[in-house]
Structure formats: C-alpha cells, structure tokens
Amino acid sequence: MLKRFIGISRYMNHNRIFFIVILAFCQNLMTAQILNDFCESAIIISDPRDYCSEIGEFTNVGATESGIPSPMCFPNGEEDNDVWFTFVAQATFLNIRVIGNTGLQPGGTLNNPEAALYAGNCSNLNEVECISDAFDANVVESFTGPLAVGARYYLRINARNGFMGTFQLCLINFNQVPEPSGDCPTGVILCDKNTFTVEKVLGEGNDANEYINSACNNTTTACIMDERNSTWYKWTCLDPGSLTFDITPLNPVDDIDFVFYELPNGIDDCSEKIELRCMLSGENVGAPQSEWEPCTGPTGLSLSDSDTGETCGCQPGDNNFVSAIEMEAGKVYAIGINNFSGSGNGFSLSFGGTGTFAGPVADFDINPVEVQCDREVTITDLSTYVNGTIASRTWFFAEDAIPPTASGVGPHLVTFPSIGTKLVVLTLETEEGCLVTEILELEVLECCAIDSDINLGIGNPLDPNCANTADGSFDAIASGGDPAYSYSLNGGPFQPNANFLNLQGGTYDVEVIDIKGCVDDATVTLTPPPPLIVDAGPDQTVDLGFSTTISATVSPSGSVVTTQWIPDTLLSCSTCLNLSLTPPGQTTYTIEVVDEDGCIATDEITIFVRDNRPVYIPNAFTPNGDGINDFFSVFAGPASTQVNLMQIYDRWGELVWEKEDFPINAEIDGWDGKFRGQQSHEGVYVYYALIGFIDGKELLFEGDLTLLR
C-alpha cells in the first residue's frame, strides 16, 4: 500500500463535519431507522454557544441499542432507545437542557428524559456528565465544565422506563461569569455582551426589599414583587446605542421577573438607583393557566415593544417583554432578576442592540497563524483595559499542546504536536471580578516523516444480509505512525471512529491519518447476496363477481420462508404464491415474501373490474300451485349478494308483500302471490327491489309485475 502525504483541508473539516452513516433498513422490517441511532452517526450541532432546536424537532422513536454501556445515572442499564449528538466545544462551560412533555410550554412528547455527555471518540468514550429525570418533570438540565475548548464531545439522550417521544434540545456553551449575587451593591459586573447561563439562583441576599418601590407593583391589589431568588448584574456603557436582552428560564414553567435601573452614583453605589423598566407579569395565583401562560417563559427588552412596564399578574395585551433601552456612554446600568416561581432554577441571559459594555479588550497575536506540527509558535498578549486593571490572564492552548495552559502576559512559546484547527483561549479577569474571553484559531499543518510506518488494515468485514439493506460493516485497523488516528470513507471527512456500520454492498476506499498528517489507505468490498425478487404477474381484468387466479414467482426459487398477500380478504389462500380470488372492485394486491435470512421483497398486481351487474326480474308469474313459475323473485349473476329489500304494491298503492335480506336466485324465498293469507287477484302490481353487490353498492330496481292464475 502507498504511504503518502495529503493536504490538511479535509482533515481540518473533521472538527466541523462528522461523518454520518445513513441507516437504511433494519433486518426484518423495511422501515427506515432514525439517523442518529448510534454514536458514529451522531447529529452535528455546529455551533453550541447558543443553540436551541425547534420544539419536538428530535425523537428517539424507533431508536435501538447503541451497544455502548449505560452511563452511571441511567437506571437498570437502560440504553435501548438512545440517540446521539456531537459538537466541538467553543467555550469552557456547558448548559444542557432536554425538554420533553412538560405541562407548560412543552418541548415535545418525551417523558422522563435523561442525558449523558462524553469526551473522546466513539471507540473510547469518557463520561463527563449524566442527568436523569427521576421525578416525572419530563425535563432535565445540567451544567458541566470546564470543557476543553476545541475538543469534540458526544451527547447521548434517552428516557427512563423505555419511554419514546419527541423533544427539544438546547445547549449553551459559555465562558464562566462570577457566581450570582442577591444584592445590587455586590452584583456581578459585566464587561461584554456575551451570552451566559446561571445554574441556580437561591435566596434574596441581605436586602429583600430592593424592588419594593417598583412602578410595576400594584398596591391596589396588594400585588407587590416578592424578592425570592434574585441576582443582580451591572455594567458601564462604552459605546451608546440600543440595548435588548432575553432572559430564558432553564425550567420552562418558571416565571422570571426583572427591574432595570440606571445607577447615577456609579457602579458601586445603588442607593439612588433610577428605575427605567419593570416586568412583573407572569403567573397569576388562583387564575386559570390559560389566562397567564402568555406572560411566562422568556422575558426581556425588545425593539418591537412600546410599553415600559407590565404589572404583576397577566393583564390583557401583556407579552412578557417591554421596550428596549437607549444606553448613553459612561452611564452605569443594573438589572435585578427574580425567579418568582421560587424553584431555585436559573436562566440564560443574552444581549442584543448596538450599545456596548465597558471592559477590558481581550486580544492576542499568534505568530505564525499556520504552522507545521512540532513547530513552535509565539503567542503575544495585546489585551487592554482603559478604565481599570487586568488582575489575571489565563490561557488554554490545546489539550495536547506543550504546554497546554499558561498564565500571565507572556509572550508564550507553544508547540502543537498534532494537526488540525486549534482554538487558543484567553480569559481576562479584572480587579472587580469581571471576566472576558477571546478565542482565536490556529491551523497546524502536517509534519509527516518520509519514513513513517503508518499502516491501515481491514478487520471483521460483514457483508450486508440482503441485497437492499444497509447492515454491512467493517473495522479499520491502524498501526504505526503517531496515534491517535482518524479515518475517512470514500473521500469523506476524517473522523475518529474506526468502526464503519450500516453499509450497503459495494467497494469502499478507506484512509487513515495520524496526528502528524501521515496517511495510508485500504480498499474493502462488501458483497450482498443475490437480490430476492417476487413477481406477482401482470395486471388482470375481470367482470364484477367473477374469480381469477394469480401465479406469483420468486427468484431465487425455493428461498421463501413466508408469503403474505395484502389485503387478504376474498382470497383462496393469503399465504400462497398461487391462489384464486374474487375482487370486490378494482383492487391492488401486494405480495410480501421473506426468505430464510429475513430479506424482504414485494410486488403489486392490480385487478381491474368491469362494472357488469346483470339482474333479471320477471314481469309475470302464475302462483297456481302447479310447481311452475309459482313465485316472484330476483335472479342475478355472481356480482350480486342478496336482495336487501323487496316491496310489492297493488294498483291502489297498498303494500301487499315485503321482505328483507333474502338470497338472490332463491325462487322459493320470493312472493307466493298471497296477501294476508289469501290469494291475490289477477292483475298488475308494482315492485321495488334493493339489490346488494359484492363491492358494497346497493341499486334500486323497479317495474310492473302481472299476476296470472
């Protein structure tokens, strides 16, 4: 096999594009599997920094066992209905939320969701976090960190007790801010508008009456903002402009309130704060949920709203948002956020608008920005803070960088032993406890030695079970070079998993690349069995009520274990290749055959039916007891089923005979010429006959009848 070097572009894509193997059909059912049934086919979350799927976008319905042992928090080894997601960490901390069948603002239909987060690759997963809904909340959320920025992680979602359903997945990958404070004077100082998440908010701080004078309090109804689980954030405006924000509760059923202030005496003095906005609408105790539901969930400042406040409860027209703020340069602002529901759950806070916050500017230079692996780069700090002092600088270069971390101004000399896109992270902390993070990319190119001994082999090839199924597989077995390895299938992006599953028959080109960029390749062919083919024969045409025969054929002959015709009514045999049938009308029949390997083949045949309904009703009869023509009845072909109703009237319109539901062509079941036990007079009578047919139709026949003696 040829040892060679390749460009880095396809390898670098593996940090953004994870190879998705499409599951075609399961072995015994021609039913498509969901795509992310296995770790190897995980759905990519391309940007986890502020991600939330559509409501009910994902599902574990139809998922099967992934073959990976259950994490510690999944009870009873539950792993049978799990689905997988993957992302590359863009920041150091992560909030995970899986929202299922919650009572208020549900994210889907899933009950008792659970989730596990892993580092590593599908062949070597290391559990990082595990959460499971054991309290029937039908939602789980968790915080974890620190994560390795630039590293790939896998998220596994399942449900307790085998539950299946749809769900909403939300991820917030953020850099940590200081712990929340329940009082304005000690509130957290923000230096930028990056989104962040607060895990928990407990208690009201030392002063439980900071909102007591809010304009949104309603003293008439004694509806006063009750400070329960509160936190404060403050900042100084640098560039003037608009400010919007969204506060999204981690628990969708929580009611979040806020009051927005200007601090005229500076960032450390809240004594004369000026209220600019207030939003207290939400849950209305004692009122039906339908009345106050529009006032719960996300809240904040919006450019599309004109009101400056919403009082407590949920008044007509309230929507949980108030109008945006125009910030002025140099002014100090604060927001007090309160979880009225008192659950202790936190929230995510994301800012918008054109105005900016004053704070240090995290900046640095990487020289060179493209470098061969095992070569040294110089990373120089360029950060500034005009209005204060930077207390500390913390660096993260890469998991395998030498060194992986550092602190201080530097410059720092760093060596990267593996190829790919590296995310270099600088976090500044000011004397006030403000945190600012900057992330830059560095491309590390190949440095493969000419005499590299990297080698790729193929192991455990398994041919597809059927010609039209994707259940073949093989393992890529690499050796030599500089592990860890990544693999590419048919020129696709490189990914760390060496087990290729759910493959159709065909020839596959496999490549392996090591951390230095050395490559080897191999070819494997998966050969499926001959296709199972069933032929139901050509379409046919028959008259209504008449039978025909079908002779189906199968190739290879003698391979069929089971046969089934659908629909299976009016057939002489529903499990035979050869049969007769009487179609009730134009009908398409499907034959499904299964062979000894569980392979399935189907075909269809349509029987067209001519609408021919021959019915003969005599116009005279002689009920004289001579055994000839003594009864008046209905005669018809096989399309007819019975006489649903027959009525006979005399010339004056009196009903002289009536009968329901009697057979066609049964003369003795017809009228014997008597009325109330006496012989009827000769003459002309009128009949009405409702005739039923095998296709369910009912037709009315009427005419004159002459009775003769």
Image (cartoon, grey):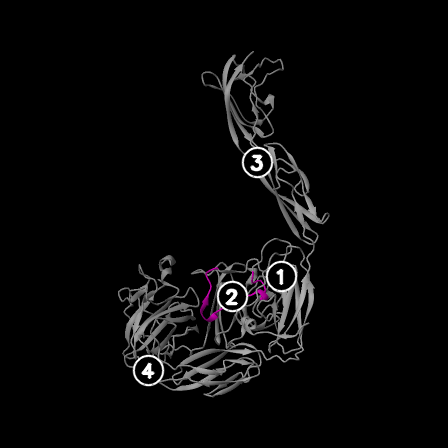
Q: Earlier in the sequence, mark 1 or mark 3?
A: 1
Name which residue lies at 66% across and 55% down: 467
The tally of labels here is 4
Label 3 element class: loop
What residue sits right under mark 3 in the picture? 585
Q: Which mark is residue 133?
A: 2
What residue sits right under mark 1 in the picture? 502
Q: Earlier in the sequence, mark 3 or mark 4?
A: 4
User: Which amino acid does the dot numbered 4 rest on?
Assistant: Asp
Label 2 element class: loop
Tell me if label 2 and label 3 are in contact, CB under 8 Å. no
Question: From which residue to which does the magenta span run?
Answer: 35-56
Q: Which mark is residue 268?
A: 4
Mark 1 nearby-residue class (10 Å; few <14, some 14–19, many ≥20): some
User: Which amino acid does the dot numbered 3 rest on?
Assistant: Gly
Give the distance between the C-alpha atoms of the residues marked 1 and 2, in whole angstroms: 32 Å
User: Which amino acid does the dot numbered 1 rest on?
Assistant: Asn
